[in-house]
Amino acid sequence: MYSLLPALVSSAFLGYGTYVVCTKGLSRITLALFAVCLASSSWQGAWAILFQVRDPQLALFLAKFGYLFILFLPTTLYHYLVEIAGCTSERRYVYLSYAFAALLVPLLILTDLIVAGNHDYFWGFYPKAGMLHPVHLLQTVLVIGRVSYVVHRQRDNISPAKRIKLNLSLGGVLVYVFATVNYAGAYGIEFYPPGAIFIAISLGVIALVTASRHNLLNPMAAAATVTHELRTPLLSIRMQAKGLERHLPALVHGYRLAVERGLCEPSVHEQTLGHLSSLGQTINQEIDRTNIALDMLLAYIKTEQFDKSGFARHLIGDSIAGALNRYVFDSGERARVEVARLEEFEFHGSDTLLILVLFNLLKNSLYAIRAAGKGTIRISTKRGAVCNQLHFKDTGIGIPKDALPHLFDAFFTTKKAAGSGLGLAFCKRVMTSFGGNIRCDSVAGEYTLFVLEFPNAEEKGQAPQLCPAVG
């Protein structure tokens, strides 16, 4: 019975490590993960057998075999987090930690300085700590402390999406560290070692992070399916709204006539009647706005496997006009948008994608104007020898200086209660697919300026040059 838990954990680690290597191939991350899984599986597998045997000599062999992997476990966890974080400069310390663990191996095998026999507990034999066992404990503390520091330092230099994965990875390793409670048994404290529970939980967290890192799970595909499924109820709502738009004004008119002729009491406020008359139109506007958001999400998802074969030459003026004609403005918002100094040029790409980019910029700027309680939007274009530019400027609340470097990172947002953080990342990917760039300049409280750069595509029969990269 006491062997069941470590046996299950051993099988889970070995199975998952093998699965990742076989499905995703060999890489620095998969090798580091496999090292964690192999060490954990061997350790727990040795304990599962150790708790069953009654021969002291065989028990000592199994205890030392298990500790052969325990010596390397802290380093494998260190190795895994370093690779997840992408800290290439830290690898030399990982190798030094492996080397130090390797120096302890002869002492483990040939002497009783690491493992000095076994305790005989109620669940079976358990390793007894030798004189140099605290050296291994000290290495464990130093390694976990070092990797926690490295991860904390690295968090400030990566995108929010990667930061989430890194935090989860560190969380999984810290849960694993709780398994060190098992060392109490090595020092004569008799209680059934619960460490297997912690490392089983840790495996679940590590599996989630690794699956996300290597796309073993495909959240984008799920998002695309959900997005498509939303089209059906939206279509049904639109049909019902069309009915309201067609019949409610007549019903409201009939109610007003009935009140005028004394056929019924005036129980509905006049303002409410006006709202009812336009209810169908309002619902249809919200559906249009939702469809725009779904179009943007689908386009963002599809850029993972973007097909440029459909790219063609388009006039920038047509795309700007198309965006402004199709965007669903609230009352008074369209008057805040000015198209000025339009120098016409062609770009090579997708006019649909560019319109979605402009939708996103409009949405963000109008949000900034509402938040500031003032402001306008000015759109202009400028021709260039290599790259043409589209300037999109609003005079809303602006963007804090410390947010600018992360503005185009996926899942980063400056909106407190709204925003997915996908919009500007989508804009960046679209402009990159056109061979261009998008950059932002902003002063908090004053303005935000987006500059979209397009390769000059006007030489017929020639591929457009790429715009210079923006740092």
Image: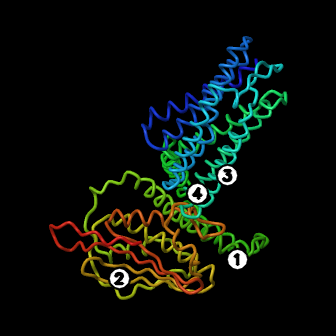
Earlier-in-chain disc, 4 versus 2:
4
Q: Which residue is mark 4?
A: 163
Q: Are marks 1 and 4 in contact (CB under 8 Å)?
A: no
426 or 228: nearer the eye? Answer: 426
The amino acid marked with disc number 1 is: Gln
Q: Which residue is mark 3?
A: 145
Q: CA distance from mark 1 to mark 4?
A: 50 Å
Badge number at residue 271:
1
Q: Is residue 14 above or below residue 432?
A: above
252 or 125: nearer the eye? Answer: 125
Horizontal side of 130 relative to 384 (left or right) equals: right
Tag nearer the camera, 1 or 2: 2
Tag nearer the camera, 3 or 4: 3
Earlier-in-chain disc, 1 versus 2:
1
Q: CA distance from mark 2 to mark 3?
A: 53 Å
The mark tally for this picture is 4
Tag nearer the camera, 1 or 3: 3
Q: Which residue is mark 2?
A: 381
The amino acid marked with disc number 3 is: Gly
The amino acid marked with disc number 4 is: Arg
Which SS class for mark 2? strand
